[in-house]
């Protein structure tokens, strides 16, 4: 584990310790209240109980937010380390036409599409959750525009590859206090690919099998 992520581990440990403390503390106060029978003190005891529980819930919510719910700003270079990789697509020869990408769609219960593509010496499969096919005049699609790209580099790749390449964005959490508190440092924040092809005819769509 990255040492920065120990910040988050320590914070969760403190919450557990605080939980044990308030359980014992509330129990002790209520026993004392019952023994003394002081009605005025009982109101103060219940109020203190509420305050301690609210603090606990606020701490749990804060840690849950920073660990799982905090939105990622992929353009924030202070928080995210960004890399872009590019590779030429390799044309595949089919019985009816040649293609760069095959698309297989899931059934009704799994509507995600699966993209398969080839680069030199390798075959990859990726889903529509983290990839898009760009077959129009511009390499940047609506889905891909959510991430930082160099339009100049994409335009250059269009020219030197004749619009047949894969561009991959990857973001990694940097060592910062908030990233450490969320135990994200060194982990992958997102990976997204643009499958660039000349036009839609260079896609082979595999039919969905009918269920019995």
Image (cartoon, helix red, strand yellow):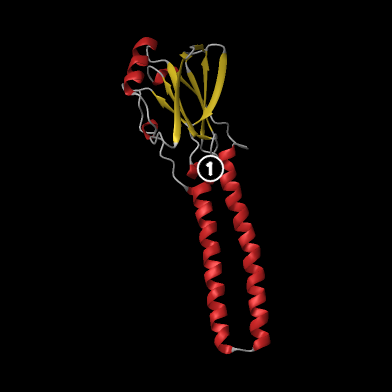
Quadrant in the rendering for residue 2:
top right
**Which of the image's four quarters has the C terminus?**
top right
Above or below — where is 114 with respect to 61? above
Camera-side residue of 107 and 50: 50
Residue 163, x across and y down, in percent: 38, 15
Name the residue at 55% across, 68% down.
52
Residue 190, x across and y down, in percent: 49, 34
Camera-side residue of 103 and 125: 125
**Residue at which label 1 appears:** 180
**Which of the image's four quarters has the N terminus?**
top right
- Per the image, label 1 sits on a secondary structure element best described as helix
Quadrant in the rendering for residue 82:
top left
Name the residue at 50% across, 42% down.
179
Q: Is residue 193 left or right of residue 36?
A: left
Name the residue at 63% across, 73% down.
26
Q: Is residue 13 left or right of residue 194?
A: right
């Amino acid at each position: 584990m990255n040492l920065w992520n120990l910040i988050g581990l320590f914070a969760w440990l403190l919450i557990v310790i605080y939980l044990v403390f308030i359980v014992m503390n509330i129990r002790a106060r209520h026993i004392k209240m019952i023994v003394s029978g002081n009605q005025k003190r009982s109101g103060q005891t219940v109020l203190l109980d509420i305050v301690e529980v609210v603090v606990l819930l606020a701490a749990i919510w804060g840690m849950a937010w920073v660990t799982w719910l905090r939105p990622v700003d992929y353009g924030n270079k202070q928080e995210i380390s960004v890399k872009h990789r590019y590779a030429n697509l390799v044309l595949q020869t089919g019985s009816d036409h040649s293609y760069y990408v095959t698309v297989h769609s899931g059934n009704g219960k799994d509507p995600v599409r699966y993209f398969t593509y080839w680069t030199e010496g390798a075959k990859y499969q990726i889903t529509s959750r983290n990839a898009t096919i760009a077959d129009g005049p511009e390499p940047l699609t609506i889905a891909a525009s959510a991430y930082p790209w160099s339009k100049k580099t994409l335009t250059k790749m269009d020219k030197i590859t004749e619009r047949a390449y894969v561009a991959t964005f990857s973001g990694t959490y940097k060592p910062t206090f908030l990233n450490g508190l969320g135990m994200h440092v060194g982990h992958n924040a997102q990976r997204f690919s643009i499958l660039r092809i000349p036009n839609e005819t260079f896609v082979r769509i595999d039919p969905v099998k009918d269920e019995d």
